[in-house]
Every structure is written in structure tokens, then in C-alpha cells.
Image: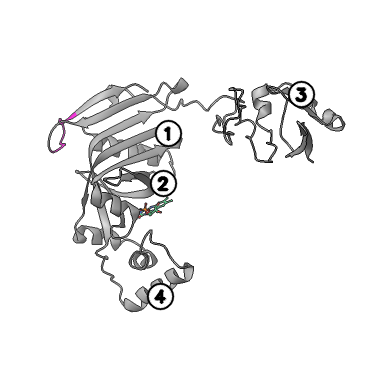
Amino acid sequence: MNIRVHLASKTLRLRPNRRIRSPIHTNNTTIGFNPSRRSELHQYNSLSPNRAYGMLYSAKNTVLGREPDSAPSTSGTSTPSKRIFAPTGGSDTPGQAVQYAHGTLELSDLAASPLDQFHAWFEQAKTANVYQPETVTLATASLPDGKVSARIVFMKELDERGFVVYSNWGTSRKSADIRSNPQAAMTFWWREVERQIRVEGTVERLSGEEGQLYYDTRIRGSRVGAWASPQSQVLSGREELEQRVKDVEKRFEGQDSIPIPDFWGGLRIVPDTIEFWQGRQSRLHDRFQYTRVGENGTEGEWKIERLSP
Ligand SMILES: Cc1cc2nc3c(=O)[nH]c(=O)nc-3n(C[C@H](O)[C@H](O)[C@H](O)COP(=O)(O)O)c2cc1C
């Protein structure tokens, strides 16, 4: 069932199941409801005007916003519409953002080495059934234009030097960025334990031999796919990719062992800062940042500081 709203001279239709207070006064316009529908609206009268505004449609029928994520302009002039406004993350309390209360973090909880600390948190994430805790946003930036790009990848290894990811280092956007600028950042978000980890550092390529160890663990289709995909290059269509896969399958037909492509492999982010973040109530989160103060980043060569949320 649709609800009609008169906005100036236009009559607009609202989607059903939206709540609104009636009538609504904008700066110079009174927006009312078709009286025949007013009986359906009694349930909306307890809502604030801000929430009610969330369901208005503009005269061009573009959505101004969605209740309860939307709010009106307060400037009195025509401003860009807010398609989303103050979403509350699925909170049970209307209008109030979800609060983080899973745990706390103290200096005394932390290991001297951030890699030990990461490992401990990673194990805790697995115990807490965090979905794929190895999922991480990897950000890179090209020089000299300074454009930043970010994408999700899987962290596949943690060793005594840093965090290893696998990808195409020939054609991908990240590879182009890193060729011009060997700095990268990674951000993990583990919702179930309300923890974020930020890593920043310098990248280095793993050797082919090291990469082969991981490559051999992948299912055959993924090993073939690594050969077949000119990652992030424009394709004429899906068929082009499928033809490339067929060509690679033919090339390695009858061969169990496939060599790792030289344009594909591991990249290690060797951190110079790592931050551990634990969500707290009222956005007063606990944050501790490790900064490398020695050359090798071995134990005792990291400074740990609490950061303001
Ligand atoms: C959950 C998830 C995991 C991913 N893991 C990887 C990965 O480990 N390596 C990779 O190259 N791309 C991975 N991707 C694809 C990347 O997000 C991205 O599309 C690809 O690396 C090309 O990015 P680029 O052109 O910015 O280099 C993953 C995507 C998702 C959603």
C-alpha cells in the first residue's frame, strides 16, 4: 500500500511501511497527508520530525533519505540530499548507534612485540568464531599523484618480519601502486570481538621458492586462475577469461605440479606501526600504538603509547 504526500504542488508516493509524523513543516512549505490516508498515520505521531523527514521524496522522486537513517537539511537553502544519514548499525535502541562493550584493553595486557600481540588476538578471534579473521583491507598509494586505493585481501602468513598477502604483482592496481611507492597499510575489523588492528609499513616481495610453498596449497582451479587472470585489466567479456583458463589448463594438462607464475606471489608488509583497538562504550575506545624504534623490530625495540579515541 502506498501513502501519498503533497509537496508543494506535487503529489508523491511514499513506499509502504515507513513511519512519518504528520503534518511536517519545512521552511516555507507545509507537507501534509492525503486525508483519506490520515487514519493510517496515527502510528507515526510519536516520531521526531527528523525521523519523519527520512521518508520524504524530492519533487523529482529522488529519495531524500530513508527513515531512520535520514535527516533534513537545517540550513534553509537547497543542500545535497542525504541518501543515508546516521545509520545505527542495527541497534535495538531506535536512533542510538550500537555501543561496543565486549571488552577492554590495558597496557598491561599487551605483549612487548606487536607481532606476538597480533598472533594472540588472531587466536582469540578464531576462538570467538570471527568469520575469516584473515580478511583485511590493504591500502596502497601511487606516486607522484598520491592517489590511494584499497581492496580486501586475505592475509595468508604471519612471520617474524610481518604480514604476507598473495596477489598478482604484474597487472593489478596494487602492484602498480607499490612499484611507485613501497608503503602499504592494512586494516582488520573483527566485529564479533569489536577489535580493529591497523598495520602500516614497507613492502617486500617473497622469493619464488617461498611463494611456491603457499601456491601448492591452493586448489588446482585457483592455481590455474592465477596464471589465467591479468588481474584488474579490462576484459572484452567473461568469454575472454574462460578462454584464458582453457589455454592454461591445456598448457599444464596432465601435470600435478604447476609452477608459481613469476608475476604472482607473496608480498610482505613489514610494519613500522601497529595499532590495537578495542571498542568501548560512548566511542571512548581503547587504542594502543606500537612504533618501531629499533632497526629490526625485535622484542624491546617497539614503543607502545595509548592513543585517544
Ligand atoms: C574476501 C576477499 C578476499 C580477497 N582476497 C584476495 C587476495 O588474497 N589476493 C588478491 O589478489 N585479491 C583478493 N581479493 C580480490 C581483491 O579485493 C581485488 O579485487 C583484487 O586484488 C584486485 O585489486 P587491485 O586491482 O586493487 O589490485 C579478495 C576479495 C575479497 C572480497
Which is nearer the N-term, disc 3 or disc 1?
3
Task: State the residue position of label 1.
Answer: 193
Residue at coordinates 83% horizontally, 28% vertically from top-left? 38
Q: Position of residue 263 (x, y in %)?
A: 26, 62
* SS type, badge 2: loop
Residue 134 seen: no
Tell whether label 4 touches label 1 (CB within 8 Å): no
Q: Amino acid at mark 4?
A: Lys
Q: Nearer the viewer, mark 3 or mark 1?
A: 3
Question: Residues in magenta?
Answer: 296-302
Q: Position of residue 170 (x, y in %)?
A: 28, 60
Q: Residues within 10 Å of mark 3 (few under 14, many from 20)?
A: some
Q: Nearer the viewer, mark 1 or mark 4?
A: 4
Q: Position of residue 74 (x, y in %)?
A: 59, 22
Front residue of 150 and 5: 5
Whole-angstrom CA distance, mark 4 to mark 3, is 64 Å
Task: State the residue position of label 2.
Answer: 132
Q: Residues within 10 Å of mark 1 (few under 14, many from 20)?
A: some
